[in-house]
């Protein structure tokens, strides 16, 4: 296994000195945002994590290796390259074998972080059960990965383009704790609220860290989803974003867009229909997750 992992100097030094490390995905750079906002956001998120006392490890597949921590040049490459594969669990081995560039999704980032013994991961929002999944069976691999891989996620809930009720049912069936960070309802990515009530809430990083320690001490497999709402000043109105998502979903159906193409199409259409406000919200929520994630990682590291 070790021959497939390549650690950046910063991450190696963090491992040797026992500093907390936070995994970051690379799909958000290659497929989630346009250039140059993607690279700028990636750099700013990494710096927020450093300022919070932890070390960022952006993960990607390059030249037959899983890179744990990217250089500035590599961030730029992933931000600008057009031939980057979107890597989930099923793609990792093939992309390594063929030495292709792979940007890791939530699921793939969790797998790679687990291999590197990194337990906390910051992202924008998790995938989930797509609307209409009762006939299409379109369910993100993220959910199964969260259920079985010991990496916990700080996110702004699930993307509101999904069926949030079915997503929560799936996570509950798999025994995944979904924890509201200062909230009693599931945040829905662009919005702070949704109709979905949460049963677990934490208001302090120290409590989140104690929860993680207890879970790991008990050898309970799988991750924890820490659902951290977008800051109030950056949130979009729930009714406004719902109407736009409905319009985007209708267009996706009309154009026969399915599978892994759905999310990038919908996010792009939402950006267009919100006149860029959704991109601003996306950037704000990722930065906020990085800040909260760093606090949890530092607190958790202090309990080891």
Image: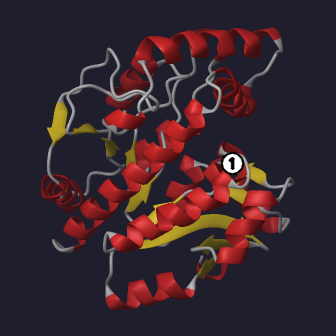
Q: Vertically, is 23 above or below 269? A: below
- For the residue pair 300 and 79, the one nearer the viewer reads as 79
Q: Vertically, is 246 above or below 277? A: above
Q: Position of residue 73 (x, y in %)?
A: 72, 76
The quarter of the picture where residue 59 lies is bottom right
Which residue is pictured at 74% across the width and 52% down the height? 35
- For the residue pair 38 and 70, the one nearer the viewer reads as 38
Q: Position of residue 228 (x, y in %)?
A: 32, 41
Would you name the residue on which mark 1 appears?
Answer: 90
Is residue 194 at least partly visible in the picture? yes
Circle 1 Cα neighbour tier, 10 Å, few/some/many (<14 / 14–19 / ≥20): few
The reply, left or right, for residue 76 in relation to residue 299 is right
Q: Position of residue 281 (x, y in %)?
A: 50, 37
Q: Position of residue 222 (x, y in %)?
A: 36, 49
Which residue is pictured at 21% across the width and 54% down the height? 215
The reply, left or right, for residue 232 in relation to residue 43 is left
In the picture, the quarter occupied by the C terminus is bottom left
Q: Vertically, is 262 above or below 165? A: below
- For the residue pair 199 and 240, the one nearer the viewer reads as 240
Q: Vertically, is 57 above or below 180? A: below
Q: Secondary structure at mark 1?
A: helix
Which residue is pictured at 86% across the width and 54% down the height? 83
Which residue is pictured at 33% across the width and 34% down the height? 232
The reply, left or right, for residue 297 in relation to residue 199 is right
Is residue 140 at least partly visible in the picture? no
In the picture, the quarter occupied by the N terminus is bottom right
The quarter of the picture where residue 136 lies is top right
- Total labels: the figure holds 1
């Amino acid at each position: 296994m070790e021959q497939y992992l390549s650690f950046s100097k910063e991450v190696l030094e963090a491992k040797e000195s026992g500093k907390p490390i936070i995994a970051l995905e690379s799909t958000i750079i290659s497929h989630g945002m346009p250039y140059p906002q993607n690279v700028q956001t990636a750099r700013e998120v990494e710096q927020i994590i450093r300022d919070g006392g932890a070390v960022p490890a952006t993960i990607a597949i390059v030249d037959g290796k899983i890179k744990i921590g990217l250089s500035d040049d590599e961030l730029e490459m992933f931000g600008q390259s057009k031939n980057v594969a979107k890597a989930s669990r099923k793609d990792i081995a093939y992309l390594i074998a063929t030495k292709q560039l792979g940007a890791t999704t939530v699921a793939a980032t969790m797998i790679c972080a687990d291999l590197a013994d990194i337990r906390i991961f910051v992202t924008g929002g998790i995938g989930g059960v797509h609307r209409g999944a009762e006939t299409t069976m379109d369910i993100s691999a993220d959910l199964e990965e969260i259920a079985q891989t010991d990496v916990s996620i700080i996110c702004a809930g699930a993307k509101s383009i999904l069926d949030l009720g079915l997503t929560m049912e799936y996570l509950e069936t798999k025994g995944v704790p979904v924890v509201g960070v200062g909230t009693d309802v599931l945040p829905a990515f662009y919005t702070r609220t949704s109709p979905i009530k949460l049963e677990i809430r934490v208001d302090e990083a120290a409590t989140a860290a104690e929860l993680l320690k207890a879970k790991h001490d008990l050898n309970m497999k799988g991750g924890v989803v820490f659902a951290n709402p977008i800051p109030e000043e950056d949130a979009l109105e729930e009714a406004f974003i719902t109407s736009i998502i409905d319009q985007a979903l209708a267009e996706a159906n009309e154009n026969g867009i399915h599978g892994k193409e759905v999310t990038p199409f919908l996010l792009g259409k939402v950006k267009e229909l919100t006149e860029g406000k959704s991109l601003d919200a996306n950037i704000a929520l990722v930065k906020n997750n990085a800040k909260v994630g760093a606090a949890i990682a530092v607190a958790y590291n202090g309990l080891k």
